[in-house]
Each structure stands twice: as structure tokens, then as C-alpha cells.
Image (tube, coloured by chain):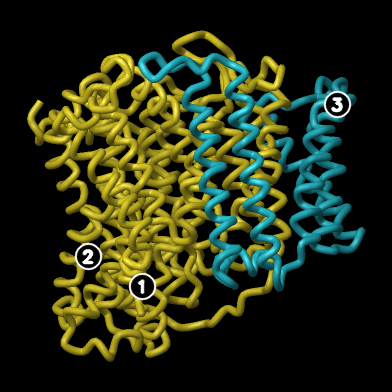
Chain colours: A yellow, B cyan
Amino acid sequence: MDALASVLYGFQVVLQPDNLMFCFLGCLAGTLVGVLPGIGPGTTMALLIPFSYHMTPTAAVIMFAGIYYGCQYGGSTTSILLNIPGEVTSIVTCLDGYQMARQGRAGPALGISAFGSFIAGTLAVCGTILFAKPIVNIAIKFGPPEYFSLLCMGFIIITYLATASMPRAIISALMGIFLATVGMDPMSGVTRFTIGTIDLTEGVGIIPLSIGLFGLSEIAVNVEQMVPAEVYKTRFKGLFPNLKDWKDSIGPIFRGTGLGFFLGILPGGGALISSFVSYAVEKKVSKHPEKFGTGMIEGVAGPESANNAGAQSAFIPLLTLGMPTNIVTALLMGALMLHGIAPGPFMMREHPDLFWGLISSMYVGNAMLVILNLPLIGLWVRVLKVPTYFLYPVILVLIVVGVYSVRNNVFDIYLMIFFGILGYFLRKFDFEIAPLTIAFVLGDIFEEAMRQSLMMSNGSFSIFFSRPISAVFIIMAMLLAAISIIAPSFRKKQLKWGDAD
Amino acid sequence: MKKLNLAVDVIVFFLGALMCWASLQMRYGKVARPGPGFLPFWCGALISIISLALFLHQLWKKNRAPKKSAEAFQGVDPLQPIAILGAMILYGLLYESLGFLLSNFLFLPLIFRLVWKKRWGFILIATLLMDIAFYLLFQELLQVQLPKGVLGYLYTFL
């Protein structure tokens, strides 16, 4: 199938009524959680994984993708209108977006944010189509050593980009790998760390782990800081940016798209870093950098385009290499594995409906989001007024029902509560939970690749250096690790580079 | 707060050591043929080594504890998360024996009262309405299998 035929096939899949409905539901849910501070796409996906069990894998993936990029749209609405970032990816939008709103230009800010995101989303879909096949062609040649080295590099980058402490992020990732070894060892048949219960023979489930770490612990952290947020009200009229706005924004939109697309592909990158880096770039290339923060439309157009492009290109490593680069794609991988589908280079051939359906759904979803967001802005603002004493109990009951309904086993609830308590303390002491979850999802593949590689080489670690692709990955991983040990200030500087100020 | 960080590193060190010990209870194998205990052992060992390094680093450098950790429990009300997590434990323990409807009737008032300090009148009405809504959504609309518990007969009646 050539690219055009594949995309048309994808549209055929996504335009089926049930897939279209789940795409719409995903976008709607994504916008909703994007608007609500404190609840992110990771939590929402973790909550919905049990319910996706009853859907087709294609419908489930289309819905989850919609939640992710829908969040980017929703987050910007409250950033611009209320100075409350619904999502971390739209923090930077507050700087100029809210100032524009205060000057009576909320309409153009929201408009350019939506149109910029749409343009970025469209171009990112084209980029995905362009890059997916060549990456798959390379990935097909991967053996266990290449996978091991690739995963090592991925783990190192994810921990390198940890916002808090890198050593603690590494500990988190190691905990994730350890947790993945619980249950029956596929190579020897030995059961490991099951503490005498048959409930752990199949291993720790992704659902109790992700819901506990994200859903429950996030609520526990949120309730201890229940300070009512001050809602700044603003008016908005005329959502279409004028000619000057377009002239000022078109460059940032394209630059943001390019940056977001390539940063999104990298492990640990995605929407968050893209938006900060785009803002920093716009400030650097602007003739009036001093005016940033006072309501410059470039400060909205660039980051909003970047976060959307980054959210979409993050799917490329998952779909082509079977490697999630952030928490959302890790949970998506977990959901696919529950359906018996292993993402990776063979997915394009074995599940073309899912692969191309997902890619085409991003385009359809972006169009839906523009239509959905602009007329419904008033409604999204009102959603913010739902009190937490209604929202959180509903989520908590939903969590328990979701976890229980998968296997009708109360042990999964205990496990989820355990991970909820663990997640609470991990968050409190700077042990990031994203590396833990990503490492947990990839743990089985990592162990298998490591053991097979060592058996192939009769115990020699040179196998990771003697094969060219593997050598590139492992040397990059070692270089990054060395930089963070020898020159930790360099890492901090790099992380700060994306900082808006 | 530095003491708290040091304590965390000590706990993590022993957790890593425990992982190593548990891994060595199964076959470690050799590098050319790693056994089931090989990877978990090295995970535990690396966790212990890194936490030991962090511990020594904090002892060595004065007041260089991670900023966020130092503020971990400052300016927050720790009773709220304890109430949420405690209520969840109780909810989980009674979920199957009491059943979905009754356990909700215990759990919802508990968190409304402990976390949000709501009045009993509000609690009663909100719990009743929410429980009915949950039942209609999960049992009737989505047909999710819910534990019936001691009220098993009521479900067949409903």
C-alpha cells in the first residue's frame, strides 16, 4: 500500500460510525480534562482502560489518542480566559494568552490557538505518514541487542529529562522494571515475588498500577492543597484573528510545528517540552523580545502549535518501534497489550486498520476539536465551577468500579490502593512516577531482550557495541549518563533552556 | 527537613537490599545464561547503590537537599490525604462483603465528612442521589458486574 492509499484506508476505518463516535468521545473527554486542573490525560486514560476492554482495539486507541490531543486544546482555553492552565502543556500559554484576554483580545487568542493547533495537527499527521514507514523498515531489522540498547537509551533520556532529581527518576525506573518481573518468568516458568498469592502469578496488572499511581495518588495530593482558585473573568468576542494576527502568527505556527514534531518523537519529549522550547525560540527570534508576556500573539501561536504537534508525533515511536516515549503512550501500549496487540514494527502489517485508522483519526479529531472548542468555550469555563466534593468522590468510585470490573477480583482493588499510597509518597519525595510506569510497561521486553542478547553472545557485553544500530543507541545512552554524572550543571542548563523566562 | 530526605534514602536503600535478597532466593544464573533472579537482583542493587550515593551526597553537602522534598509536607493538610487513602482502604476491604451499594453508603459519607467537612443533611442526600446514579449507570446502563454483598437479594428484586 502506498502512503495515499494507506491514509485513505485509514479514513475509511475512522469514518465508520462507531470509530467516529469514540473519536468524538475521546476529543470531548480530552477537552473536559484539559479544562480541569489537576486531572491530566494520564489519569483519564488510566481510568478508562478497564472500560476499553469492551471496545474493539481500534476504537479504544482512537478514543485514547483523542483524549491526549483533546487535552492540549482544552488546557489552552482556561489558560487564556482564566489564567488557569488546565494542563501543564498550556502553562506557557498563560503568559501572553491571558494578557491578550485582559486587553479584550481573548477571541483572537483562542482563535489562533485553535487554528494553530489544527494546522500543527494536520502537518504532524503528514509527518507521521512520511516518517512511519522508513522507521518501520529499519525497525524490522532490530534484534534483541538493538531493542535492549534502544530501551536503555529511552530510559536514560526519560530520566535525564526528569524535572526534579535524576537519580530519583532512575530509582523510579528501576522500581518499574522490578515490578515488571513480578509473576511467572516466561523463560523458566518460575514464579517471582508473588508473596504466596496466585493473584500475582500473571504479574502486576497495568490497570491497578496505573490507576493507583495516577488516579488515586493524584487525588490524594490534590485534596491536601484545596485552596479555592481565584477565577479571573474576562470577555471575549470575535474568534477569528485579523490579517495582522495571521501575519504575526504564521511563522511561529510553522516553527512551533517543526519543533514540536521532532521533540515529540524523542523519549520524554512530547507536548510539555515542545511548548516551552517554542516559547523560548519565539522570544529569541522576535524583534521585540521585551514585549513577550504582555500579550504577544506569537507567544500563543508558537507554543500551542508545538504542544499539539508534539502530542501527535509522540505516537510515532510507539507505533513503529513499540516504544512509548511518555506516560500517555505507555498507557496506550498497556491498553493495546490488554487487547493482545503488541505495538511495534509489525503492527503496520498485522493491524493496518488500527495503525492507519489511528493516524487518520488524528486528522478527523483535530477538525472535530476546532468545531467543538470554539462554540463551546462558555461551557468549558462553566465546567471549572464543578466543586471538587462532587468531582473527586465520583472519580474515586469510578476508579474502584473500573479496577474491579476487569477480573472481578477484589485483589486488584487492594493492589490499586497499594500503588495509590506508593504513588502519593513517590510524588512527595520527587520520585517521578512517569519513568516508573514507562519502565514497568517496557520491563518484560527489556528483560527478554537482555537475556536473549547475553545468551546470543555467550555472556559478552560486546554484542551491544559490535552491531552498528545497537552501538549508536548504547553509546548515546552512555554519553547522556556520563554528562549527567560528570557535568550535572549542563543537564540543568539544558532543562532550564526551555523555561519561558 | 534534611533529616526526612536522609530517612527516605535509608528506606530506599533497604528496599533495594530487600529486592536483592528476594532475587537471590531464585536462580541467578550466569551472565551467559541469566536466570529469573538476574535482572531483579541488579535492579535492587542499583537502587541501593544510588540511594546510598544520595545519602552520602546529602550528608557531605550541607543544605543541598532537593528543594521540593524539603517542602513535601509544608503548608499542606496531611489529614486530608490520610482520610482519602484510609477511607479507600476501608472501602476496598468491605467492597465485596458489603456489596457495591452498601459500601458506597459507608464510603461517600466518610469522605464527605472527613475531607470536605460537609453537614450531615447534605451528606445523606448527596450519598443517596449519587448511589442511585452509580447504580443506574453501572448496573443498568453499562451492565458492569458489581459485587452484590449482603444485599444480594435486593439486586434480584431491583
| Residue appearing at x 66%, y 52% in the figure | A425
Which residue is most to the right?
B120
Say which element carries label 1: loop
Are the residues flagged by discs 3 and 2 from a single subunit?
A: no
- Label 3 or label 1, whichever lies nearer to me, is 1
Observer-nearest of A236 and A416? A416
Which residue type carries mark 1? Asp
Q: Is residue A233 above or below residue B110?
A: below
CA separation in Å, label 3 and label 2: 55 Å
Instruction: Identify the residue under disc 1.
Output: A499
Local crowd at mark 1 within 10 Å, few (<14), some, or many (≥20)?
A: some
Residue A290 in picture, x, y percent from top left: 27, 91
User: In the image, A218: left or right of A368?
Assistant: right
Observer-nearest of A191 and B39? B39
Chain under label 1?
A
| Residue appearing at x 66%, y 36% in the figure | A416
Observer-nearest of A329 and B130? A329
Which disc, if any, is residue A229? Answer: none
Chain under label 3?
B
- Number of labels in the image equals 3
Q: Quadrant of the N terminus of chain A?
A: top left
Say which element carries label 2: helix
Which residue type carries mark 3? Ser
Instruction: Identify the residue under disc 2.
Output: A256
Instruction: Identify the residue under disc 3.
Output: B97
Which residue type carries mark 2? Gly
Residue A292 in picture, x, y percent from top left: 30, 85
